[in-house]
Amino acid sequence: MRCVTPLLAAALAQLEATHGGYPWYGPSRMTILADVTAAEARTAPVGGGPSLWALVLHMTAWTEEVARRLGGGEAAAPHPADWPPLPTPASARAWAAALRHLERAHAEVLAVAGAVPEARWAQPVRWADGGHDDTTHADTLIGLSQHDAYHVGQLASTRRTLRAAAEGTSRQG
C-alpha cells in the first residue's frame, strides 16, 4: 500500500493554490475571475468554446461531485449536469452567486477530504452499478486538481481573448 499522507497534503495544497493561492504556472482561478463582469462571463469566445460562466458552473459541478465521492458516495455524473446551463437571467447578481457557489464547493471538498480516513485513500471509488475501476479516492482528488488546472488555463485564455476583442472594438469606435 502506498503512503498517501504526503500525497494528500500535496494534492490539497495544489487544489488550494489553483483555486485561490499562488500556483507556479500563473494566476489562480479566483484571481482570474476577480474582476470579470457578468457580461464578460456570459460571452462565449469567438470561434466557440465555453463561456467563463459555463466553465465556472462546470468546475463547481465537478468539485461537488468529487466531494460527494470522497464522502463515500458512488461515482456518478455531476448533479444537476456536467455542464449546467447558465441561469436566466444571467445577471450580475446571478454571476456573483455562481462565484460564491464555487467558493463553497471548494471549501466543502477541502473539508470532506480532510475527514477521509487514511485507509480509504488507497481504496477504489465504487460505481453506482456496484463495480469499480482502479481509480482510488486519492486519484480522484488528484484528478480534480488536474481538472481545475486545465480549466483555469481556459479561463485565462478566454478572459484574455474577450478583453482583447473588447479593446479592439473600443479603439475602432
Image (cartoon, grey):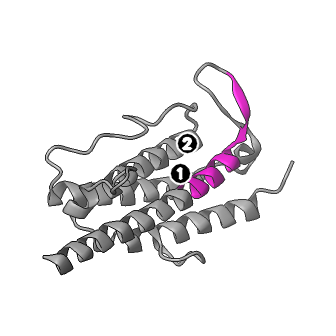
Judged left or right of residue 122, residue 108 is: left
Nearer to us in this view, 148 or 167: 167
Q: Range of the magenta residues?
A: 131-147
Nearer to us in this view, 54 or 140: 54
User: Can residue 100 be spotted in the picture?
Assistant: no
Look at mark 1 in the image and give the residue it sits on: 112
Residue 167 to residue 69: above or below: below
Residue at the image position 63 percent from the left and 51 percent from the top = 143
Coordinates of residue 121 in the picture (x, y in percent): 71, 47
Residue at the image position 39 percent from the left and 63 percent from the top = 158
User: Can residue 72 be spotted in the picture?
Assistant: yes
Residue 17 to residue 51: above or below: below
Coordinates of residue 163 in the picture (x, y in percent): 30, 72
Residue at the image position 23 percent from the left and 57 percent from the top = 95
Name the amino acid type tagged 1.
Val
Which image quadrant is residue 39 in?
bottom left
Nearer to us in this view, 117 or 121: 121
